[in-house]
Image (spheres, rainbow, N blue to C red):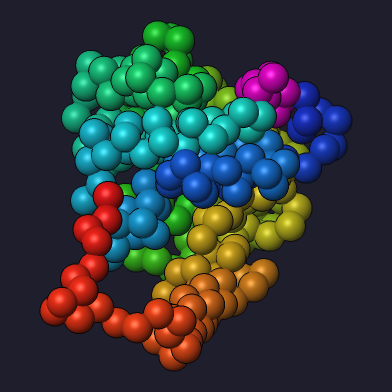
Amino acid sequence: MPLTIRDLQNYKHQGRIITALTAWDALSGAWVEASGCDVALVGDSLAMVSLGHATTLPISLEAMVHHTQAVGRSIQRPLLVADLPFLSYQCGAEQAVAAAGRFLKETPCQAVKLEGAEPETMAVINRLVRTGIPVMGHLGLTPQSVHCLGWGRQARSAPAQEQLRQKALDLQQQGCFALVLEHVPAVLASELRRELKIPVLGIGAGPDCDGQILVTADLLGLTPSQPPFAKPRLQGATMFKQALQDWCHEQRHQEQTTPPPTASNPPTPGC
């Protein structure tokens, strides 16, 4: 049976660490399923990891639904969550409900994640939750705001930390069932873990969170550029490239067991 939102909330109360990984297709979904993690996130990071974009902004709603469907074919146990892409929820509650509803109607997804806590976003979250669509919040480094905030650590000053703290409380008040804190000071994340009743999942937010979430491709060393807070467990890109190069080299240099075809003895067409 797949995990539920209530399971994650119980894990927090039990002091059990929650693990979350991203997936972008059926193959990566199978890796995540095999890992035994608790949450599978189809993040809009797939725009960079899988589609080669420089930011997460270009990914469309159609593409996110398509990739979530693919991941869903491999996921059984983890809670499946999908990112709402840029401009699918920033243009009003009606459009946001329609976008988020597609994930619950057309994929096995059980919840959506969105970034920020501005007044307009709060109104959207309130509407989604009242509609019956579970929402995971996301504060700190929010990639959809990269042109305003950049890729660096967020909430460095005391006023900025207090502002983020209040936003986290507001997200909980609006009904978010969990919160991702990305690239913020560890002390702030630790304080929020204790203050909030909902699970706090950190990514580059120190070890003292209710759980940790990472981009699977970063963890496996498959991305060209590693975030400073995601140390790869293996050099996957180098290993894969070497294996493929070795195979090509072997094929080109193996001794041929049959003579090459001649004009009088043409090859038989394959299927």
The one of 105 and 29 positioned closer to us in this rendering = 29
The one of 128 and 28 positioned closer to us in this rendering = 28
Residue 145 appears in the rendering? no
The one of 3 and 7 positioned closer to us in this rendering = 3
* Horizontal arrangement in the rendering, residue 176 relative to residue 51 (left or right): right
Residue 50 position (above or below residue 232): above
Whole-percent x, y for residue 117 in the image: 40, 37
Residue most extreme to the front: 264
The one of 258 and 74 positioned closer to us in this rendering = 258
Residue at 14 percent across and 79 percent down: it is 263
Whole-percent x, y for residue 33 in the image: 63, 40
Residue 176 appears in the rendering? yes
Residue at 64 percent across and 73 percent down: it is 234
Whole-percent x, y for residue 203 in the image: 59, 55
Q: Quadrant of residue 9?
A: top right
Whole-percent x, y for residue 120 in the image: 29, 29
Q: Which residues are magenta?
A: 1-9
* Horizontal arrangement in the rendering, residue 197 relative to residue 242 (left or right): right
